[in-house]
Amino acid sequence: MFTTAAQLLDLTDKKLLLVLRDGRRLLGVLRTWDQFANLVLADTLERSFATVPQPDGSVKRQYCDVPRGTYLVRGENVLLIGEVDLDKDDDAPPGYEEGNVEQVIACVEEAEKARRKRDKTRGRKVAQMWGGDMEGSGEVLF
């Protein structure tokens, strides 16, 4: 289902959660939009989630919010739009606690680097099996 102008009209000036194609999560107030579902968010926060290793060997599930200000999102990059319940907005997401921004971002970048390496290895194996190149094959889901 596509996001239509009538659906966006109801969401104008409300706090939204957007999930983008690259996995980023944005929280902000929808100020304006156009016929292509390009969105302008005000007071935007980028929320990141990570499992942070602890010195005792356990892991903590943490999140952090990075202020981004006014944010323009191209419509084709939006996977999900949801209205935020303002009564629960100040609560931490269930199962997570707020963490240090630098530490959480470092863990997110490390996990992304590992995912890219794993995908590259997987692509090489597929290329060997089928004699093709995974780089130019578009978005392939495994």
Image (tube, rainbow, N blue to C red):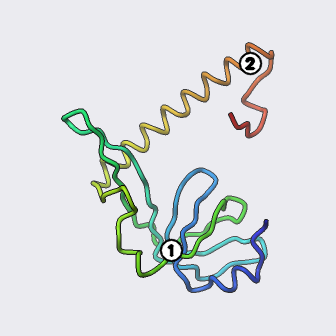
Determine which residue is flagged by label 2: 127
Q: Mark 2: which secondary structure?
A: helix
Determine which residue is flagged by label 1: 28
Res. 142 mark: none
Q: Is residue 24 above or below residue 136?
A: below
Q: Nearer the viewer, residue 137 or 58?
A: 58
Q: How many marks?
A: 2
Q: Nearer the viewer, residue 103 or 92?
A: 92
For badge 2, the amino acid type reads: Ala
At x 51%, y 65%, the residue is 26
Q: Earlier in the sequence, mark 2 or mark 1?
A: 1
- Cα separation, mark 2 vs mark 1, equals 42 Å
Q: Is residue 6 above or below residue 122?
A: below
Q: Quadrant of residue 83?
A: bottom right
At x 24%, y 39%, the residue is 54
Q: Is residue 42 above or below residue 53?
A: below
Where's residue 20, x and y in %? 61, 58
